[in-house]
Structure formats: C-alpha cells, structure tokens
Amino acid sequence: MNTAKKHTRAITNTVNSPYVKLKSIDFGDCRWTDGFWANKENAAAQIMVPYMGKVLCGDVGHGLNNFKIAAGEKEGEHKGFYWHDGDFFKFMEAKTYIYALTKDESLLKELDEYIEWIGKAQEEDGYIHTHIQITEGAERFSNRKYHEMYNYGHLFIAASVHYRLTGQRNFLDIAIKQADLLCVYFMPDTKHYQRFGFNQTQIMGLVELYRTTRNKKYLKLAEKFINRRGHYDIKHDSTTEGYPIGDMVQERTPLKEAKEAVGHAVLALYYYAGAADVYAETGEKELIDALDRLWENVTDKKMYVTGAVGQAHYGASTNLDMIEEGFIDAYMMPNMTAYNETCANLCNAMFSNRMMALKEESRYADIIELVLFNSGLSGISIDGKEYFYSNPLRMVNGSRDYEAHADVTESPVRQAYLECFCCPPNLVRTICKSSGWAYTLSKNGVAVILFGGNTLNSNLLDGSKIKLTQDTNYPWKGIVKITVDACKAEAFDIKVRIPKWAIGSTLKVNGEDKGVEVTPGTFAVVNREWKAGDTIILDMPMEITLLEGHDRIEEVRNQIAVKRGPIVYCIESPDLPKDSGILNVYLKGNAEFKAVHKPDFLGGVTIIETELLLREGKTNDMYQTVTKPIFKPYKTQLVPYFAWSNRGQAEMTVFMPVVW
C-alpha cells in the first residue's frame, strides 16, 4: 500500500476534518476535457476573468485603486460599496484557480502585483479595510454595515486557496496578520462587539484559515461568532444604526435553536455554510441538527424551481422584522418580483455542498447541480461579459420600476458592470472551481458528483492511485460513461450520483447489469475489485417533464414549468410573434414536446420545440367579464432559463398557465 497522500490543494481543505465523510479532491486532480463545463471553464479563462480584471483593476470597478489609495500611492476617494474589497478578493480567488489549471506565469505575476498593493495598504497591526482607511471620520468596527467581516472572510478564503495552489505565503501572511487582529478585538467578551458582524463570511474564512495553518484560535473565534449570536436584546445601538436588525441578520434566534431560514438570503446561507464548516471540525450535535432543519426549510419551502432563493427585495420576516434581499414566508414565491440574488443562489449550492460532505448523501448534490445549471449560470451572459444580480422567473416589459436600482441590483437586461459587484466574481470563481466539485473521496473509494467530460487523476484516502475518465454529452444527453484507467487491486467503492429527477435510470458495469441498486436521489454504490479498462455506464432517461408547484404557492397555481434533466426551460419573447405579450402565453398540456440540440444557438443548447397557445381578445382593464377564451396555436421553442436575455431585452416566463 502506498503511503497516504495528504490532499492539501483542495478548494475547501477537509482532509483532516474529522466529521466530513466525503473529502475534497485536490484542485486540478479533475480536469474538464470537453462538453458543457469544459466550455464554461475555457470561457472563464479566456474571457470572464480577463474582462473582470480590466474592470476591477481600472477606473470602472476601482477595486485595485482602493488599495492603492489606502497604501498612499494614489490620490482619491474610496469608490464602490463598503464590501468592494471582498469582491476583489473573490476575483483574485478565481484568477488563482485559472493559474492552477493553466500554469500561466503571467497570471501569477499579476496576482503578486495585487498582493503587493494589498500588503502596502495593510496597517502595521494587521488592519485592512479600504473604506475605513480612506474615508475621513470612519472608524474601525464602529458599525457593522461597513462589512469588515464580509471582506475578511473572502480575504481568508482567497489567501488560503492562493497558498495551497501556488505554494507562496505572501497573500497568506497578510490574511494571518488580519486574523490575528480579529482575535484581539473579538475573542474577549466585549459587550460592544457581542453582536458585531453583518454578513458573517468571516466564519467560513476563519475555519479555512484554521485548516490551512492548524492554528486552533481561528476555529475558536469562528465558534464564538456563532455562539454569541442571538443572545442579546434586539435593539439599535452604535454598531447597528443604518441597517435593519433582528431576523435580517439572523440575530433574533440563536442558530442552534433556529427552525426557519430568515433575513437576507446571502447573509443566512454564508452563516449556515460557516456553521457547517465549524461542525466539520467539532462535531457539535446541536449545530448539525439546526443545519438539518434549516436546509430542509430552505429547499422544501423557500426555494424556486431553478434552485434560486431570496424571494423578495423588501419585506418582513415571520417575526415582522424588516428584511432586504431575502427570505420571507414559506411558499410565498412571486415570479415577476422574485429577487433571487445570484450570490444567494450560489450560496445555496455552497451550503448544500457542505451538507453533502457531512452527510454523504446524494440529495444535497441535486441542489448543487440545480443551481449551477439554472439560477447560478443565469447570472452571466453567454459571452461572459454581462451580469444579472437578481434572477426573476418572469420578466414583463414595463412591469416594474428599475430606475431606483439601475446598474446596482435589478435590471431588465444584464449589465457590463454592477456598482454592487458581489455577484459577478462569486459566479466566475464558482465556474473556475467547478471541476473541484466533480468528485469527492469516501472512506473506501470515490464519489461521482457532477457529470461532464473530464479526467480524474488523484489518490484515494488510503494513498492508492485512482484514474477515471468520464465521457458524456450531459446535460443534453443522459448517458454517462466512466472508465477506470488505473486503480488499486483491492476492492473499493465507486459511488455514482443518481439525480432525483432521473427516474428509470440504469447502471451497467462492463456492459452487464450487476444488480446495483439505482434509486433516484441516492448514490448507486458499486463495490468490486476494479481493473484498468472497466467501465460504468449510467443511462438517465432525459424525459421532458411538466412541473407544478405546491398548492400553497399561490403565484403558480394552475401553472406549469418545463424541465428536462437538470435544465429548467422558459419561453422568451424573441420566440413569439411580434407584439405578443408573455402574459398571453398558455401551455398546451397535450402538445408534443421535442428536444432538439442546436450547437450554434445561444452557445450550443438543447431547445424544446412545442406548440403553445396565445390567448386573444383580452383588454387592459383591471377586471373584465370572462367569456370563453379564444386561443391561437403557435409553434415555437423553449430555451434554457440560464440562456435567456441573450438576444436583446426580452420578456420571459418560466411558469405558464396550462390548458389541457
């Protein structure tokens, strides 16, 4: 037996995390080779990251400029929102992944230049937060709306990833210096800081820094941030003025007692992901019990069919606290005003990814995949240069006033730059690291999580070599062929995810049915003495399905969504007659639905050809007498939701009323 290889180059380094059952592979051990994700990764390397670099390192995005000003090397005022440093750190993380995949030394040199400026901006005691440093009268940790904790979380994560993938300490040392200062301020039970932190990304970051350095004080501080929250009076003080309090920032109920996802969706899901990271190291039962409840609440009662979350821009929690950009009541799921921030959707996948690793259950990966192919990817244009912040399920021209939030969060078309720039680098870094999510390592084997043309060249947890090749045209076709190229002689598991939607799937080993249980929503586990050349073929029927919502979702009563495999579809106005409004479209329940692949359309997608019904004779009166509706049949196509709004400003809807 080989000496066990320590997997230390993983995105989230869980190799030594005692309560993680599915361990991360080293980043780069899996490579997308062809197909959907290979194309997206290539676009990220060639278009998305370079374009974002021009934005953030120039005078439009001003991310790098803020560090130069803070370092005293450039004149000017801080530009961008309080959390712009964190957005820049996410961009750096994305660039680090591309460097690790390409070994392009010019990328490493550029990263070194950014790190040098960040180091110059950092104060002697470790403090760095450009808004505070540049803005006269702004004080350290004086108001949680300044988002220092959010910025630090992304600093710690990006620096940890940079160290693992480059072997250089220059960025990590900056992060350690800042983390040590956090310990000085926040480890003592100081009343002033007991409820500090708006977007608590620092919890994830501190755990990742602990995993990188093995310094336990970072883990203890992460625990402290969780355990303090919810144990104080909910009223405004000097650290909260200017932003909503209570459920908005998940402080009304201690996390270990929480039963419902509340407040700002990004804040909540980063918080839950951080708590999952803490549980991975401590195994505290109250934490995992709470996370189980919260995950079920999110995915069963507050998640859209696209995997999106955060139903409202403005609203109230069930405790009647004011909330923004977040969760409201269960089953309250508007389509046209759905907020569904790209970051929140991605955080939904991040939380599920952690729960999958802790529980070793395939159902969590269904959420990861749902987000990646739908509400995550909808946040960026096909050409990789324009972004959505919010991702509604219906767009009707003139239906809402976008002026107040133009170029910030809501827009009828994707924007080349969003002043609130948190979502674009979050999505791009996710695309860049997607290959690191494709496989995980189990106690005695490997689990196949994401499907796509790829190769895996890694080590099992016992140190033995494992090489796999995955051949598939997924998500457009449902056949996945996995070939064992090299492995140990002893028996081990290959766990293959069977998506919940993949009813009727079959799995064969070397062309034969070996009696392996294939149950949608679980892993199919094949244990045998493998040898080079062995194959697994998973055949998932890619049936076109019609979905309806829960009876309590009033906004979709008597309406239907169309899904094929992991892809949710929509109808878009470019595929309707001129001057035909999206609200006049009805689904013909007994119509034929035909999947057709168009390699030169919208970057190469499978569309669904069908015949819809267009209702005629309606007026604009608010209420009108009903007569027998007049419908005109119209043959057209449905397109993947992620690809909408790539043909100019358009109307769109996912759910359509149905006529049987």
Image (cartoon, rainbow, N blue to C red):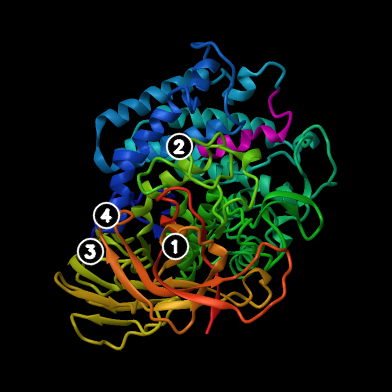
Segment colored magenta:
139-155
Q: How far apart are marks 2 and 3 (CA)?
A: 39 Å
Which residue occupies the foreground of this view, 618 or 526? Answer: 618
Q: How far apart are marks 2 and 1 (CA)?
A: 29 Å
Is residue 107 left or right of 649 when viewed as pictured? Answer: left
Q: Residue under label 1, please give it.
A: 577
The answer to which quarter of the image holds residue 139 is top right
Name the front one of labels 2 and 1: 1
Name the front one of labels 2 and 3: 2
Circle 2 crowding by C-alpha within 10 Å: few under 14, some 14–19, many from 20: some
Label 4: state its secondary structure. Answer: strand
Circle 3 crowding by C-alpha within 10 Å: few under 14, some 14–19, many from 20: many
The answer to which quarter of the image holds residue 608 is bottom left
Q: How far apart are marks 3 and 1 (CA)?
A: 48 Å
Relative to residue 310, is residue 449 depicted above or below? Answer: below
Say whether disc 2 or disc 3 marks the residue closer to the N-terminus: 2
Name the front one of labels 3 and 1: 1
Image mark for residue 32 = 4
Q: Distance between the residues labelled 4 and 3?
A: 12 Å
Instruction: Tell me the amino acid under the disc marked 2.
Output: Ala
Say whether disc 2 or disc 1 marks the residue closer to the N-terminus: 2
Q: Which residue is drawn at 75% across and 36% down?
A: 193
Instruction: Tell me the amino acid under the disc marked 1.
Output: Pro
Say whether disc 1 or disc 4 marks the residue closer to the N-terminus: 4
- The secondary structure that most of the magenta stretch takes on is helix
Q: Position of residue 520 (x, y in %)?
A: 43, 79
Q: Do the residues labelled 2 and 4 touch (CB within 8 Å)?
A: no
Label 1: state its secondary structure. Answer: loop
Name the front one of labels 1 and 4: 1
Q: Residue under label 2, please give it.
A: 416
Label 3: state its secondary structure. Answer: strand
